[in-house]
Amino acid sequence: MSPRERADTPISGSPSTAQCPSHNARVPECDEERRKNEEKDEVREGKEKEEEDERSSDEGFMGMTPLLQAHHAMERMEEFVHKVWEGRWRVIPHDVLPDWLKDNDFLLHGHRPPMPSFRACFKSIFRIHTETGNIWTHLLGCLFFLCLGLMFMFRPNMSFVAPVQEKVVIGMFFLGAVLCLSFSWLFHTVYCHSEGVSRVFSKLDYSGIAFLIMGSFVPWLYYSFYCSPQPRFIYLIVVCILGLAAITVSQCDFFATPQYRGVRAGVFVGLGLSGVVPTLHFVISEGLIKATTMGQMGWLLLMATLYITGACLYAARIPERFFPGKCDIWFHSHQLFHILVVAGACVHFHGVSNLQEFRLKAGGGCTADGTL
Ligand SMILES: [Zn+2]
């Protein structure tokens, strides 16, 4: 960070005057810097005087000291909030972040400082920093699935065998996708607000992933086991229980810590991989050829590959691990993971649409042996 950047960073202390010696007064930047320094000196002197007054008037009241400290802390916080409110903040390096904002030490620069103002957090969507890509990948993904979902809901009833039922079932996938992506971009937007806010939204973010996985299972199970309602119901119950278990574990504070990055990836990959059992059931009962043609197994495998690749990059922090400081703003693991999640959801929707089309062509009836 340059000395000028440091000067404008709300939390990073006093500005450097090393580049503006006294004989350089004619340089406009130096004039400006000197003026700022003088203003700051005045403010500092005033504050010191105030503090001294308060200290002397308070010396006799030993019990008041913590109160005074709280008062000064509040004042400093107000001053800082005012600066952030006006958008006067600069990105800061990883090593000066408070512990609760330190998540990935391979991203060396470009972090937002703590900004205890929602307005400032939302305005930061339009600034360049380590979270810009994370926010936009899922904000745009969220809008995309919202529009796609609405278009799907307004499709004419003649495109379905059982319009209401099918719209509800596929609507579950859209609900899961929109919840996951919106919780995610909201979390990345307000992540730097404060420790408490970051904790609440990280729990929502993780719960959103479970919603997406659960929502993805619903239409797939519905169409794949269209003529076998009993196993369909059992698999649906099992994935709901596993999803709720994942949501429950994401409510624990330790789950969001950097040390548990691998565990987090494992929990959600495990939840997704619980689909292996119904997949094998389908392949065994329908045969490999039917599974790949009518069952859309190819799209399902591609979706699983995208999600698992994303989770592995996320857990191993690739590529920034190999290029520390080079992927601070673009192409770091979390961003790639976000893109792969959106791609995986698109592939899943394509597979489900094909299943739905197949059902429309086949009609609502089932053969006596209960196959497709
Ligand atoms: Zn994320």
Image (cartoon, rainbow, N blue to C red):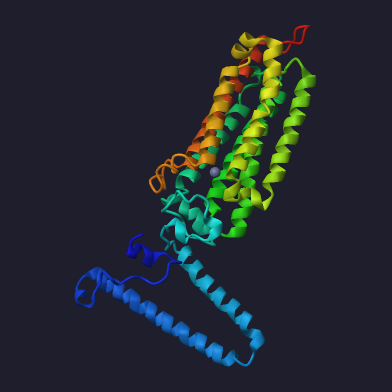
As drawn, which residue projects farthest toward the top?
A: 368
Q: Which corner quadrant of the image does residue 28 belong to?
A: bottom left
Q: Quadrant of the N terminus?
A: bottom left
Question: Number of numbered discs present?
Answer: 0
Q: Nearer the viewer, residue 65 or 129?
A: 65
Give the residue drawn at x 59%, y 81%.
Answer: 68
In the visual, does 243 lie left or right of 313?
Answer: right
Give the residue drawn at x 56%, y 57%.
Answer: 100
Q: Quadrant of the C terminus?
A: top right
In the visual, does 247 lie left or right of 318?
Answer: right
Give the residue drawn at x 72%, y 13%.
Answer: 364
In the visual, does 28 lie left or right of 240?
Answer: left
Q: Is residue 363 visible?
A: no
Quadrant of the rendered image holding ligand 1: top right
Above or below residue 50? Residue 91 is above
Above or below residue 135? Residue 90 is below
Above or below residue 54? Residue 217 is above
The location of residue 347, given as percent across then percent down, is 55, 25
Q: Nearer the viewer, residue 1 or 258?
A: 258
The location of residue 201, given as percent across then percent down, is 61, 51
Q: Is residue 238 visible?
A: yes
The location of residue 298, given as percent across then percent down, is 56, 18
As drawn, which residue projects farthest toward the right?
A: 230
Give the residue drawn at x 64%, y 18%.
Answer: 356
The location of residue 196, given as percent across then percent down, is 62, 58
Above or below residue 341? Residue 325 is below
